[in-house]
Image (cartoon, helix red, strand yellow):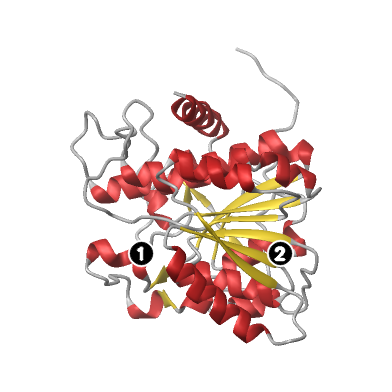
Amino acid sequence: MFSSTLPLPVPAPPLTTPFGFASTAEDVIEGIGLGGRRAVVTGAASGIGAETARVLASAGAEVTLAVRDAEAGHKVAATITGGLGKDAAGSVRVAPLDLADRASVRAFAESWTGPLHLLVNNAGVMASPETRTAEGWELQFATNHLGHFGLATGLHGALAAAHGARIVSVASNANLLSPVVFDDPHFLFRPYDPWLAYGQSKTANILFAVEASRRWAGDGVFANSLNPGAIATRLQRHVGNRLTTPPERRKSVAQGAATSVLLATSPVLEGLGGRYFEDGEEAPVVHRRPEDFTGVAAYAVSPVNATRLWELSRELLES
């Protein structure tokens, strides 16, 4: 039997901010200037992606709406630009991006020139019927995780050139539904379940932020993830456009975008990565699913799982 007098490491206390459940993206951005910063927001043609893009542009950022529906993207861009005012320094452009199409992701990354300061991986599919990509990959894992993984790795040079870039990975409390099942991520053996598939993809979003920060911290690139909360948007189109969350726990689009904007801009997050936030604060790690679905599952922030997912993702995209 061995003993040691070495003290056990003490976990860092969770980060707190002045913001909470009811805070809006505009509350978070107040007093912050983003002049000279360039941002990409995926899925910015509607919902919290559009609001995130609007608020970043209002603070002076040059924002690219990376969208599958270019027509919808241009409408959002026109609305944002029209609301900026003649003295605003920010600008908005639209670029096509289909996260479920490897060629589209590659083309977006290869067309980017110059530094990229903020990458907000916001787009997503939720609880869709069983659908597969051209490669035979399960759609939610392919879109929510693999597409964003390919985008971020393809833009790594641009992020490093920013000398202090941030990646925001929009996850969900659905991480509490399922770990990444490494032996069967595409439901080739398991019966398909839309919510388990969604939960797995959201766990993957969190693990990506953990491993990206570990690998890229030396390049000045840090990633964090978040649960935006329950917001009525097009994300619910596969479940009848309805929310089952109690009314008192629902958020407006402006509130739902708040934590994304916080992770993208707050000085509190300078040089920090691999953390998961909800309602404006770092969430506790849980080892059993709470009844109120708060916190982040231990398997979703495991460094071992994060490294394994990174290697799996790279193998899939290079196959």
Relative to residue 148, is residue 214 depicted above or below? Answer: above
Front-most of residues 295 and 3: 295
Front-most of residues 208 and 290: 208
| Circle 1: residue type | Leu
| Circle 2: residue type | Thr
Residue displayed at 27% across by 40% down = 132
In the rendered image, the residue lying farthest to the left is 191
Mark 2 crowd level (few <14, some 14–19, many ≥20, 10 Å Cα): some
Residue at disc 2, secondary structure: helix
- Name the residue that disc number 2 marks: 265
Quadrant of residue 7 within the rendered picture:
top right
Which callout, 1 or 2, points at the residue further toward the start of the chain? 1
Residue 171 spot, x, y in % from top left: 47, 54
Residue displayed at 44% across by 50% down = 98
Q: Which-is-in-front pick, marks 1 and 2?
A: 1
Residue displayed at 80% across by 64% down = 36
Left or right side of 304 for 116: right
- Name the residue that disc number 1 marks: 235
Residue 13 spot, x, y in % from top left: 68, 53
Picture disc at residue 34: none
